[in-house]
């Protein structure tokens, strides 16, 4: 029998070896104090995560009525209070009221006041990792990523065995577009706590930053197994699935985020992008409208809504939407090409020209804005300005058949047939379609080079036999050639 083969002491050691122990790093960590609970919860740590940490490590305080009130004053909800009840309680230590007040400021999104309160607390307790963690979180709400990185780094030095500080640094590296370090920090967090849903989420973001989409999707799904009610993870999953090309999957992820967090304008906006990609323009418009209703100050939503109206050829709606956008922010860079397209469709070239000039101003090195502006200037009877823009378009994109074609058209209208034929020759070389052959023929005819022109018209007629104009010009040229022989 086993008892006869082992000494009593050895038998006890054997039994203990069969008992599953917590991960070594977490097992050595001291109990959690009330200030940490308050600050970590206010800084976005989930109630279930905090409850599990408390159960593993215990608490330095008891949930007396006074402490429970201070926790709730600091923003703790009943779910967290209930979860903490399962943890081993410590002596009847009081929760710090000043920390509770600072946590409440964070929960109420009063970030400037919160940071002042946290830094005041830090003066008397400079090595408090939870305070640095909370200040970093506040810095992120101000979008000060560099300051957040510094504070999370201090928190990591003070408490390197806390998985969450590594996961937050993973997110910072993601914000820096540094996928490799984001992945490394997330993996460090998971080596400390394999059940950390936030670490899996940020691991997914790191993979997404590196365009490793299948790995990112897997990481997000692991996060959702641990925290199935995390709307943010569904949101990130939606972004990744869209980038991966899985539009139905992205829509499903966004709908899940919407169910968990109603009234989140960004989810409606991103779902609009998915529908737009899928060609479901009416559905995209509906989502953009809802996003606009929820967040009327978000100008990108208005811009996308206007662009979708353009794509649907609802030009009146596009003009209304984008005109309102530019009234709110005259310096908004996007959408000028769209509203110009709307004006062109309505035949209002004079209204289109200023919009196209703004499009050129915001994208001076883009060939297309210069080309389209040149085309509209031609239609507006401004050939000199048109020539300038079209020459710039050709210079910026010498391999654009369209740019050469319209520069040739402008030169033809200016009666510079030699230069026009050169541009049409380039257009034909780059794109030998019927129109380019036809316009080359027209410039050659104007130069009296009838044989060459006839050859080009024959090619144009062969490429597009349904176009009666080509045959008519060919017959006209044949008559002209016959008459010129007498």
Image (cartoon, rainbow, N blue to C red):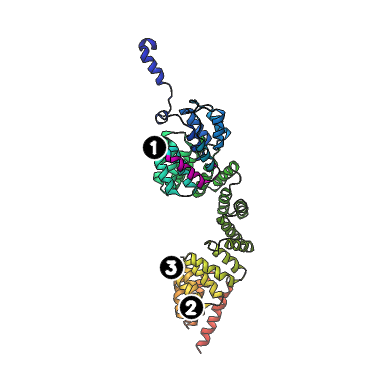
Seen as rendered, the residue at the extreme bottom is 486
| Above/below status of 33 relative to 426 | above
| Mark sitting on residue 76 | none
Q: Secondary structure at mark 3?
A: helix
Measure the C-alpha gap from mark 2 to mark 3: 18 Å
Task: State yes or no: residue 115 in magenta.
Answer: yes
First in sequence: mark 3 or mark 1? 1
Measure the C-alpha gap from mark 3 to mark 1: 55 Å
- What segment carries the magenta color? 107-123
| Mark sitting on residue 158 | 1
The answer to which image quadrant residue 377 occupies is: bottom right
- In the image, 472 versus 393, the foreground residue is 393
- In the image, 90 versus 216, the foreground residue is 90
Secondary structure mostly seen in the magenta stretch: helix
| Mark sitting on residue 396 | 3
- The residue positioned 56% from the left and 45% from the top of the image is 254
Looking at the rendered image, the quarter that the N terminus falls into is top left
Residue 331 is situated, as x and y percent measured from the top left of the image, at 53, 63
Residue 314 is situated, as x and y percent measured from the top left of the image, at 63, 61
Residue 380 is situated, as x and y percent measured from the top left of the image, at 56, 75
First in sequence: mark 1 or mark 2? 1
């Amino acid at each position: 029998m086993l008892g006869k083969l082992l000494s009593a002491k050895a038998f006890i050691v054997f039994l203990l070896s069969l008992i599953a122990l917590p991960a070594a790093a977490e097992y050595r960590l001291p109990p959690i104090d009330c200030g940490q609970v308050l600050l970590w919860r206010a800084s976005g740590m989930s109630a279930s995560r905090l409850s599990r940490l408390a159960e593993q490590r215990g608490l330095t305080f008891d949930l007396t009525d006074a402490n429970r009130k201070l926790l709730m004053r600091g923003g703790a909800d009943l779910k967290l209070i209930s979860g903490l009840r399962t943890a081993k309680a410590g002596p009847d230590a009081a929760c710090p009221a000043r920390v509770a007040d600072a946590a409440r400021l964070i929960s109420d999104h009063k970030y400037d006041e919160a940071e002042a309160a946290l830094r005041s607390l830090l003066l008397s307790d400079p090595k408090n990792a939870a305070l640095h963690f909370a200040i970093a979180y506040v810095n992120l709400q101000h979008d000060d990523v560099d300051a957040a990185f510094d504070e999370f780094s201090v928190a990591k030095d003070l408490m390197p065995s806390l998985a969450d500080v590594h996961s937050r640094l993973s997110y910072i590296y993601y914000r820096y577009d540094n996928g490799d370090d984001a992945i490394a920090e997330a993996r460090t967090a998971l080596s400390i706590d394999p059940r950390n849903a936030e670490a899996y989420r940020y691991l997914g973001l790191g993979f997404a930053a590196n365009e490793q989409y299948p790995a990112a999707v897997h990481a997000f799904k692991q996060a959702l197994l641990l925290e199935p009610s995390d709307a943010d993870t569904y949101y990130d999953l939606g972004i990744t699935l869209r980038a991966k090309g899985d539009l139905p999957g992205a829509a499903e992820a966004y709908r899940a985020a919407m169910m968990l967090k109603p009234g989140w304008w960004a989810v409606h906006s991103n779902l609009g992008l998915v529908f737009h990609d899928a060609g479901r323009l009416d559905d995209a418009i509906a989502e953009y409208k809802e996003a606009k209703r929820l967040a009327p100050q978000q100008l990108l939503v208005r811009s996308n809504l206007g662009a979708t109206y353009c794509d649907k050829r609802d030009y009146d709606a596009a003009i209304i939407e984008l005109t309102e956008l530019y009234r709110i922010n005259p310096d908004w860079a996007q959408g000028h090409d769209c509203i110009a397209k709307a004006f062109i469709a309505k035949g209002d070239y004079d209204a289109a020209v200023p919009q196209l000039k703004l499009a050129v101003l915001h994208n001076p090195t883009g060939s297309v804005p210069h080309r389209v502006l040149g085309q509209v200037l031609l239609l507006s009877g401004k050939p000199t300005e048109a020539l300038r823009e079209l020459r710039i378009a050709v210079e910026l994109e010498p391999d654009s058949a369209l740019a050469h074609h319209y520069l040739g058209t402008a030169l033809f209208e200016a009666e510079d047939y030699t230069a026009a034929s050169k541009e049409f020759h380039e257009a034909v070389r780059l794109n030998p379609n019927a129109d380019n052959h036809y316009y080359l023929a027209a410039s050659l005819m104007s130069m009296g080079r009838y044989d060459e022109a006839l050859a080009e018209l024959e090619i144009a007629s062969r490429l597009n036999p349904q176009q009666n104009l080509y045959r008519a010009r060919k017959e006209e040229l044949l008559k002209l050639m016959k008459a010129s022989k007498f």
